[in-house]
Image (cartoon, rainbow, N blue to C red):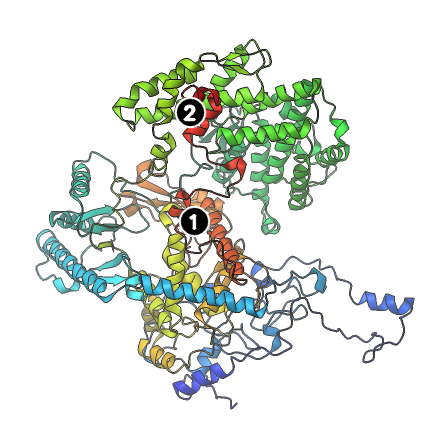
Amino acid sequence: MDTVPTSSTGRSGPGLEDQLRNLILTNGPPSSQSTQEPGASQPTASPGDVNDHHKPKKRPNQAQRRQMNSQFNIPIDTRAPASPESQRHGRGNSGPGGQRWRNQGPDPRQTDSHQHGNASHFYNNTMPSKSYAHGHGQHNNQSSSGYYSPHNKRPQRGSFGQQSPSSWRGSHSSPSQQPRRLVFRPEEIVNQSAFLEQLSFQVVSGSEIERAEISEKEAFRMRIESIIRDVITQHEQTLAQRWDFPSPSVELKCFGSLASGFATKASDMDLALLSPCSRIPPDAKESPIPRLIEKALLDAGLGARLLSRTRVPIIKLCEKPSQQLYDDLSAYRKAWEDGLHDVHDGQEEDEVEPLTPGNAATEEHEEPVAESPRADNAILKSDEFEIPSPHGGEPQRFYLRQGPKASISAYSALAKHVLRKAGGRDVRGATSYNFSDHEWDVLNRVCAAFVRGLSDSELRQRLQSYPSLQFKSVHNQPDRHSMKAVSCQIEGEQFLLDLNRLCEKSGVDIRQFQTDQTMMAWSELQYRTDYGVDPVQYTREVQNALERLRKVPFSRIILLEQGPGETPTSYHIRASSALDELVKEPGPNAKSLERATVGHYISGISTHEIRLALEAEYEGASQRWSLDTVSRRHKALVLARELARTLEKGAYKSENVADIQEYIKILRTPPQITADGHIDDPVAPQISALVSRVRAVTDPHALTRNQQNQKYKDQLEFPSSGCGVQCDINFSALLALQNTILLRCYSLTDPRVRPMVLFVKHWAKMRGINSGYRGTLSSYGYVLMVLHYLVNVVQPFVCPNLQQLAPPPPPGISPADIEKNTTLCGYRVNFWRNEEEIMHLASLNQLNRNTESIGSLLRGFFEYYAQNNFLSNRQGKGFDWGRDVLSIRTAGGLVSKQEKGWTGAKTIYEPQGDAAQTTELKSPQPATDTDIQSAKPRGKAGDFKEVRLRYLFAIEDPFELDHNVARTVTHNGIVSIRDEFRRAWRIIKQSGSGAVNEDLLLNCQDEQQQPQQQQPQEGAAVSLSDVMLDIHGPGIFEHQK
């Protein structure tokens, strides 16, 4: 292939078709050397090799074997570990070649990581010359080093061909140490792809938006635009005295899925308000335009509501609101005009946390105590501590103490919160090497306060007696702690205390269960003095020891605690199983163990009021209760509580109220107990008629099942259907418009892009993981995930990297003009945006050489995000959710969280109202927790909004590089997203053999309503009739026969 000459003077090379042909021809399949399986080994030659070219005819002697073995020794690298991005495999394309830079020098125009091939361009006339494209890594070198092999080191990101010995952590390891690739038979892969191909066809044909719906939305957009033009023109002319204001300059442009080509049926319309001639921009905090528009839209009979506390101001709008919704929206607007409520306009997308049993605040447990930094100069108390300022300022004072009823887990969560509030973070494997002295000091002080604040004095004294928790240097060893290690040490010692108390009460000798080695190993860890040499390794050892402790006999009883949302029936089953595991035959020990189990059962009940009531009944009883008796009383008290709450909400018919009230009294009456500890119920025949009538009413669970999910639902939220066209009017969407153009250009590069995106969006919607307001990921985030896969993971690529193919500026333009034409809102926005050129080349199949079906691409997509081991039918490994940031602007598609500074949740303070005009806050990119703490504003509480930035999942915006598209993903959200990817991949693997037992696109709401036929016994849902049968026994219903 002839080499196209390049010119440093900016002269253009050959024609566009020749340029792309050269790029595509270099994108051939990897050579046989490059496609070697990860587990395969290659011969290594050295001067000392024996029989380099011939196989020995006899077994080598001892000296020869020793020499051969030395060649396989793994050298120990004592240098600092390589950055995470340099440790990733070399998958993905840096452009059409699908590879990183090979044997090329750096692009002289790129000077930092944030200008590294970023963003899009306003020049859209021609494709870049070959020299420019190659400078951005679009050249595909056929070298086998670009593909993974255990003996081929991959280039370090940003090294431009210079390879570091530590660039691949597995390059020296033996084949047996490499993770194994999941192997499928060819027919299985074909079946899996066909399964997804068929589903994709059904989804796209059923969810693709129709032209009539697009026309309807466009007519509504034009109507709104006319109203808004009149409002802004009148405002500028009458209030600002600008009689020459150009009304046509006010535009309402469509962006988002409708404009990018990724819209589905009933997709909302995203509109950007542009008014460049306004004296005050509409997105400015002091601009009255958003409120004026809201009122005008309401006066026009539309449903409008301004959300001013979202990331950017938004008006949510619907065409045909119900009368009740319209009245509520009008009343809300009137209340704002009268100043009757705060400007807290609905949900804040950065703050919403979904209500789950794990994070819901309940009244069952007393919360631990922590206070904000104090400014007084009083003498420190025993449960107070100070954090010195890193800049020499006044130290902050904190107060950390465990409440008398707070659990260890709740107290541990509070300690972590205090650590963040103090500007610190916990040490982890990826961050330990760059911890500063101040960060170690903050972490140690909070850990010491964590131990001092324990409410159990015996537990606290035991912990403080260990050298590892005295918080002072021992034998000149470094005193560095990990919050995770201290938390595990507290849990372990609490477990041992409970174990000793249980053994004393039951009279059982723990030594008969042969647990001495486990106890000794735990004790040795606590007496270690070298814990601070490597805190991360010490944390792992403590965690492993704690897990071994939890496996000793009695552990299931000691750790017995009712889980969030767990029914009394399931709780009783677990307690009985734990008791049966210890009691093999009747005897004195059996009764003692049952009494101990009853005590732990009662103390582990999650509802505070029920636990207190049951404790009072149990302590006041003349006979000791059996575990079955305690469980029946537990069920009775819980049922009484649920019936009473349902009555308070007026959910039952009036003719049933009297019976339910009478039945609640019966449930709350302490029973009579027989000599053997069981319930004696002689009045069963008298109440059997009442019980039968109550048994026939609606289950309280069925009446209140959806009330908790709707507890935090916005009362002004628009319904999903039935109110006409819905749209969001965005007042700050200049970058969003550029994003839309970029996505539309990507959709034009290949006809498979759009159906893939539509399928993934539909799947995420069906599985309930597509809402940023509910702690998961927005649809835009899933689009970027698909594009990253098609650009960087698939080989050969499906889409070229349009930002890496940004055309060069025309010759003769000054640097100032170049900056002006390629920068918007301070961000680089240049990319290959010539849509006609892209469509022309795509129609000629000149943009890529990939011939995979949509089903095959979808199979690889779900495998890539479902696991992080080697991919089954392509090079590279799956996505590393914990370390990597998706970055479609970057060659290779990945940067590390460490490089971005996105290594932990951060809090920033955004100005509101008047504070926005006087306070200028720095962008959080990339700031440390200490920097953010010191930048905390000192205005009134109402002047600032606290925004939590989360990096559990990280997707870099293509242009706004300091913006994490996945910032709304909470802990529960990331768990749900990853679980759904694993579920999808499990179903896809099953389809290889034709045995698909689950619906990949099953609506999650329908799934919750379906009976759990195969649900485990411990978690089985129990109906009202079954609960009443457990409480009263079968005899009570036999009286009615």
Please determine whether, in this image, residue 471 is positioned above or below residue 437.
above
Q: Quadrant of residue 246?
A: bottom left
Q: Which residue is mark 1?
A: 969
Judged from this view, the residue extending furthest toward the bottom is 2
Residue bearing the label numbered 2: 639
Nearer the observer: mark 1 or 2; the answer is 2
Q: 118 left or right of 507?
A: left
- Picture coordinates of residue 486 (x, y %)? 62, 36
Label 2 CA crowd tier, 10 Å (few <14, some 14–19, many 20+): many
Q: Position of residue 498 (x, y in %)?
A: 64, 25
SS label for mark 1: loop
Q: Residue at x 39, y 62 (%)?
A: 759
Asked if residue 940 shows in the view, the reply is no
Q: Which residue does the image show at 50% across and 18% down from the upper left?
A: 614
Which residue of the protein is positioned furthest toward the top in this rendering? 622
Mark 1 or 2 closer to N-term?
Answer: 2
Q: Is residue 146 above or below residue 910?
A: below
For the residue pair 891 and 594, the one nearer the viewer reads as: 594
Residue for point 33% across, 41% down: 944
Amino acid, disc 1: Val
Residue 969 seen by the camera? yes
